[in-house]
Image (tube, rainbow, N blue to C red):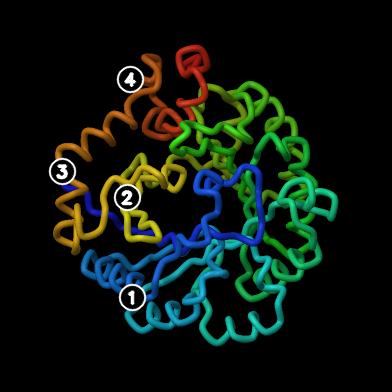
Amino acid sequence: MTVRPKIAWFTTNQSCNLRCKWCYERGGNFDPHQTLSLNLALRLLGIIQELEIRDLIIIGGEPTLWSHLLEFNGRCRQVGIQTTLVTNAYKFSEDDFWTEYLKSPNDKVSPSVKAFDEPSMKRLVQVSGVDFIQKGLERLVQKYNCGVSFVFSSFVKHDMVSLAKFAKSCGAIRISVSPCTPSFSDNGVDPTGMVALKEMVEIVTSEYPHLHELMEGNITLSIKTPFCLWPKDFIDTLRKRGQLHSGCQFQGRSGIIFGPQGELLACNSMAKFPIGELDKDYSDAKSLISLLNSEEVVRNYDHINSYPSEKCIGCSQINSCGGGCPLMWTVYDATESIPGWENP
């Protein structure tokens, strides 16, 4: 079966106005020189057009710091590409930026919340200004009627309700929660922020009723782990309420990620290890598809996406949970952790 991506991500930069301790960009030290030029962005835009991709996610770093954002938004709109901006919302508190942004906005936004008060700002993202975050989030939520996401990490494992309350106070109609994943660099695997699996299950299942009540059921949990780690009635409840999300573009090979130099990435957490380089391994849509379906790339994907445990083979849930995020098993021991799903 030929792999042909349906959605694309452009990583515009590695710089950021926050310093979240669990960020995947920490492996690149938030390098301000790693930025996507407008000419390259437009060239990549042409490639995804040839691939008939119509949905583009703009990420960073922090893409509001990308000097070409508004001009690029306009070019995407001209060619019928729908854009979603992933942002920490901080810069949207600036009146001048907000005024200019409204002239050439993204079609959608996906804002994330990192902290919930001034002490947590200094503790978690190492800057001050929770009022700026709140102002930016309020503007985005009012314009887009959108939800807000946050990462469940060791730094906020007991602050889930506080984060949700802050998001709701900004007007968020929904919250989405996903666990922290490892970052990869030349120094190896960095598990900073990850929570032991058993502890994560205990905390999330304990806090879930409060989150559900607070958000009136408008929550999504992206657990990124095998379902069998969780109480079966908990998974069943999430399914029944439409609150469960699992899997990702990496496992289904449904998406494609471009780095700031046009390098092809399997996952943003693996930015230091591209699967292809522009004008070396691919140069246009045809050669990109050829690369994605090459024997070496297919073999590497199959290896990383292989069953994490023998207990996953033949499991009735494997097509739903995918065995969890493959990157997590570079930190956790799948053999010891995965109990297997027991059908009634």
Instruction: Please state the horizontal and vertical placement of residue 312, each as a whole percent of the image.
Output: 38, 20
For label 4, the residue is 314
Disc 1 target residue: 39
**112 left or right of 271?**
right
Q: Is residue 76 above or below residue 29?
A: below
Q: Amino acid at mark 2?
A: Ser
Give the SS element for disc 2.
loop
| Label 3 to label 1: alpha-carbon separation | 28 Å
Name above or below for residue 307 compared with residue 257: above
SS at mark 4? loop
Give the number of the mark in front: 3 or 1.
1
Mark 2 touches mark 4? (CB < 8 Å) = no
* Residues at circles 2 and 3 in contact by the CB criterion of under 8 Å: no
| Side of 88 relative to 343 (left or right) | right
Residue 344 showing in the rendered view: no
Q: Closer to the N terminus: mark 4 or mark 3?
A: 3
